[in-house]
Amino acid sequence: MIEFRDVGKRFADGTVGLEDLTLTAREGEITVLVGPSGCGKTTSLRTVNRMVEITSGSVHLDGRDVAEADPAELRRGIGYVIQQAGLFPHRRVIDNVATVPVLQGMPRAQARARAAEVLERVGLDAALAQRWPAQLSGGQQQRVGVARALAGDAPVLLMDEPFSAVDPVVRVELQDELLRLQADLGKTILFVTHDIDEAIRLGDRVAVLRVGGRLAQFAPPDELLAAPVDEFVSGFVGRDRGYRRLGFVPATALRLVDLPTSPDANGSSSGVPGEWTLLLDGAQRPAAWRGPDGGRHDLGSVYVTEGGPDSAVAAVEGAGTLRGALDAALSSPAGRGVAVDGEGRYRGGVDTDDVLALLDRGARSGDAGA
C-alpha cells in the first residue's frame, strides 16, 4: 500500500509541483495518475522511491515513512518502469533483466535464471535473451523493461508512461499483457499516463490531477465516467464518457440470437443463398462472413461474453459488457454481431435492436444491465 499524506513539493524556482496530495494506492491494485502536462503525475510517482524529495507531508510504503529509509535500499525493493524502457545499451537483454537480483545479492547465474523465467512470463522468446537492446523493437524493449522491474519480485511497481512511446497496436498488446500479469501476480502498481482511455482501461482506481499537483477526483473508472465532480474532470474525461462507461455495464440480460452458420473448410463454404452466413472453423471459432453475393467478409468486432485468467481473450476490452456487444453489432457487415466465449468459440449473435433496448431500459431504470 502506498499512502500520500498531505504531500507538497515546491521546487527551487518556486514552482509548485504538488499541493496537499492525499490518496492511497491500495495493495494488489492498479492505481492510475492521469492529468494534463504539469499536473505533477511523474513528480508524485518519483516521491515514492525518493527520486524527488518532498517539502511537506509524508509518503508511506506499507505503513513506513519512505523518508526514514535508505534511498538505495528503498529503490531496490521497488520495481520501476519508465518511458522507452531505459535499458542499459551495453548489456544484453538477459543481463538487463538480471540487474536488480544481482544488486540484491543473488549469484549471477541464479539471477540470469530468474531473468529467463521473467522474460518468458512477459511473453518474450528465449532467443531474445542474448540480444542487445538496440536489436529489439520498441514493444520488445518495453516488455524487457517490465521484466526487469518484475525480476526483483518487488511487491510495488512504479510505471511512468511506460507504453506511450510505442504505436497504438503494440500499446494495446502491452496493456493486455499488464492486465494478464496483474491478474496472476497481484502487485501494487502506481501507473502514470496522460491518456484517459489507458487510465480507464487499466486502473482499479483513477486519480485525476489538476495543474499544480492538486487532486481533482479519485474514484473507480465507472464512477469517474458516471459522475465527474466538476467541469475540469468532465472535460478531461471527454464528451463520449457515456459510451465508454458501457464498458463497465455488464450485458447479463442480453439475449443471443441464432445466426446462419456453415463450416469453413480450406476456405470453401456453403450457406443459404441470398443471406449472410457465419463461417466457422473446425474448432467452432468464427472465421469470416459469407455475404449474399457469395464473397468472404471480415467479421468486424466480436463480442466476448466471458473471460478468465487462462482465457485466450481474457483481457479483451469490453468483454461481457454492453460496450463490447454494441461494438460487435455496429461493426458487423451483416448487421448482427458475433458473440464468442472466453476461448473464442461461437456462442450466438448480437442484434443491434436488443442492445439498444437494454440501453433504453437502463436509461429509464438507472441500470443498463438489469
Image (spheres, grey):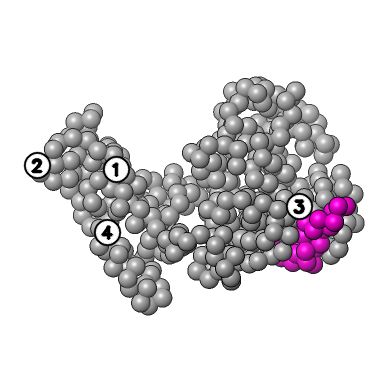
Give me the residue at 29% from left, 53% from top.
329
Ranked by sequence position, the earlier of labels 2 and 4 is 2
Q: What type of secondary structure mainly makes up the magenta span?
A: strand
**Distance of label 1 from label 2 (alpha carbons):** 19 Å
Mark toward the viewer: 2 or 3: 3
| Amino acid type, residue under disc 2 in the picture | Pro
Total numbered circles: 4
Question: What is the secondary structure assignment of the residue under circle 2?
Answer: loop
- As drawn, which residue projects farthest toward the front? 13
Ranked by sequence position, the earlier of labels 2 and 3 is 3
Quadrant for the N terminus in the image: bottom right
The residue singled out by tag 3 in the image is 43
Residue 103 to residue 205: above or below: above
Ranked by sequence position, the earlier of labels 3 and 1 is 3
The residue singled out by tag 2 in the image is 273
Q: Which residues are magenta?
A: 1-25
Give me the residue at 64% from left, 61% from top.
207
- Seen from the viewer's position, the closer of residues 236 and 310 is 236
Question: What is the secondary structure assignment of the residue under circle 4?
Answer: helix
The answer to the question of whether label 3 and label 1 lie on touching residues, with beta carbons closer than 8 A, is no
| Amino acid type, residue under disc 3 in the picture | Thr
The answer to the question of whether label 4 and label 1 lie on touching residues, with beta carbons closer than 8 A, is no
Residue 352: numbered disc: 4
The residue singled out by tag 1 in the image is 299
